[in-house]
């Protein structure tokens, strides 16, 4: 029985730290700024290509199905941190455009 109580206390601490990360105001403020930039670049991609990209990676790397891709270079500068940044968002095409959500912040 003592082991179950200890495991329960340990697991409740793990859940709390994961929850704290999701509501960290500094992290969420940063992700809000990043999301605004991604949305701006998604609109530029659509203006250049006539549609939204199938995947966020096409803001960094050339999309083969768009002849006008990044006429001024990549939509988001290619840096290792930007690959990580893009992975922290959930992106999906929808009938009326796209949905873009943070995986870490509400």
Image (tube, rainbow, N blue to C red):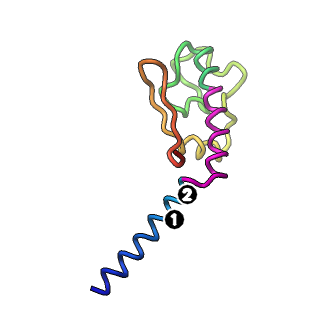
- Does the magenta-highlighted stretch encompass residue 19? no
Q: Which residues are magenta?
A: 23-41
- Residue topped by disc 2: 21
Left or right: 69 with respect to 51? right
11 or 73: which is nearer to us?
11
94 or 64: which is nearer to us?
94
> Magenta stretch: dominant SS?
helix
Image coordinates for residue 1, horizontal then vertical, percent = 27, 85
- Does the magenta-highlighted stretch encompass residue 28? yes
Q: Secondary structure at mark 1?
A: helix
Left or right: 58 with respect to 95? right
41 in relation to 88, above or below: above
| Extreme residue toward the bottom, this view | 2
- Residue topped by disc 1: 17
Q: Residue at x 51, y 33 (%)?
A: 100
Figure quadrant of residue 86: top right
* The label number, if any, that marks residue 28 in the structure image: none
Q: CA distance from mark 1 to mark 2?
A: 6 Å
Q: Residue at x 48, y 38 (%)?
A: 90
Image coordinates for residue 55, horizontal then vertical, percent = 50, 31
| Extreme residue toward the right, this view | 72
Within-10-Å neighbours for mark 1: few <14, some 14–19, many 20+: few
Q: Are marks 1 and 2 in contact (CB under 8 Å)?
A: yes
Count of numbered marks: 2
Left or right: 11 with respect to 18? left
Q: Residue at x 46, y 18 (%)?
A: 96
Image coordinates for residue 20, horizontal then vertical, percent = 54, 60
Q: Residue at x 43, y 23 (%)?
A: 94
Image coordinates for residue 30, horizontal then vertical, percent = 67, 45
Within-10-Å neighbours for mark 2: few <14, some 14–19, many 20+: some
């Amino acid at each position: 029985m003592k082991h179950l109580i200890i495991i329960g206390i340990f697991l409740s601490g793990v859940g709390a730290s994961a929850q704290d990360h999701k509501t960290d105001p500094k992290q969420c403020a940063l992700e809000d700024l990043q999301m605004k930039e991604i949305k701006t670049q998604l609109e530029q991609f659509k203006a250049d290509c006539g549609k939204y990209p199938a995947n966020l990676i096409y803001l960094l790397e050339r999309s083969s199905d768009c002849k006008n891709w990044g006429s001024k270079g990549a939509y988001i500068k290619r840096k290792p941190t930007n690959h990580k940044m893009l992975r922290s968002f959930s992106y999906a095409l929808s009938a009326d455009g796209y949905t873009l959500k943070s995986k870490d912040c509400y």
